Image (cartoon, grey):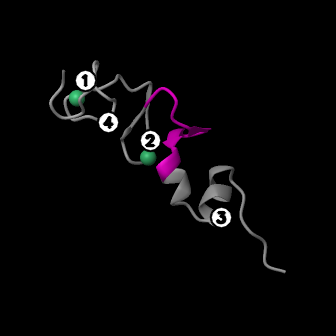
Amino acid sequence: MCEICRQIPCHPRCPNAPEPEPKYECSECGEGIYEGDRYFDGPDGYICEDCMENKSVEDVLGLFGEVLTTA
Ligand SMILES: [Zn+2]
Ligand SMILES: [Zn+2]
């Protein structure tokens, strides 16, 4: 049994667990996007959920080539 997580096989978050193969790579932060992760399939590449959450409304609109209009 693993001494850290006490599971067989290791819990996925256990430091002893083998790294899963990322399915895609985030085009902004370079982090892997793994099976079960949510991501944005944008025109310039895949963007992980973390990066999307850090975006402002203007950033997100910019992904589609749109901007906010001033009234
Ligand atoms: Zn473990
Ligand atoms: Zn990212």
Pointer 1 with pointer 3, Cβ within 8 A: no
Secondary structure at badge 2 equals: loop
Secondary structure at badge 3 equals: helix
In the rendered structure, the answer to whether residue 42 lies left or right of residue 31 reads right
| Between discs 4 and 2, the one toward the N terminus | 4
Bounds of the magenta segment: 34-50
Secondary structure at badge 4 equals: loop
Which part of the image, by quadrant, shows the C terminus? bottom right
What residue appears at the point 78 percent right and 72 percent down from the top-left corner? Answer: 69
Q: What residue is shown with label 4?
A: 13
Give the answer, above or below, for where 67 lies relative to 31.
below
Q: Residue furthest bottom?
A: 71
**CA gap, disc 4 and disc 1:** 10 Å
The one nearer the camera, 5 or 14, is: 5
Where is residue 44 drawn, in percent x and y?
54, 40
State whether label 2 is within 8 Å of ligand 2. yes
Q: What residue is shown with label 3?
A: 57
Q: What residue is shown with label 2?
A: 27
Q: What residue is shown with label 1?
A: 18
| Between discs 2 and 3, the one toward the N terminus | 2
Q: Residue furthest right?
A: 71
In the rendered structure, the answer to whether residue 18 lies left or right of residue 56 reads left
Would you call the spot at circle 1 few (<14 residues within 10 Å), some (14-19), or many (20 or more)? few
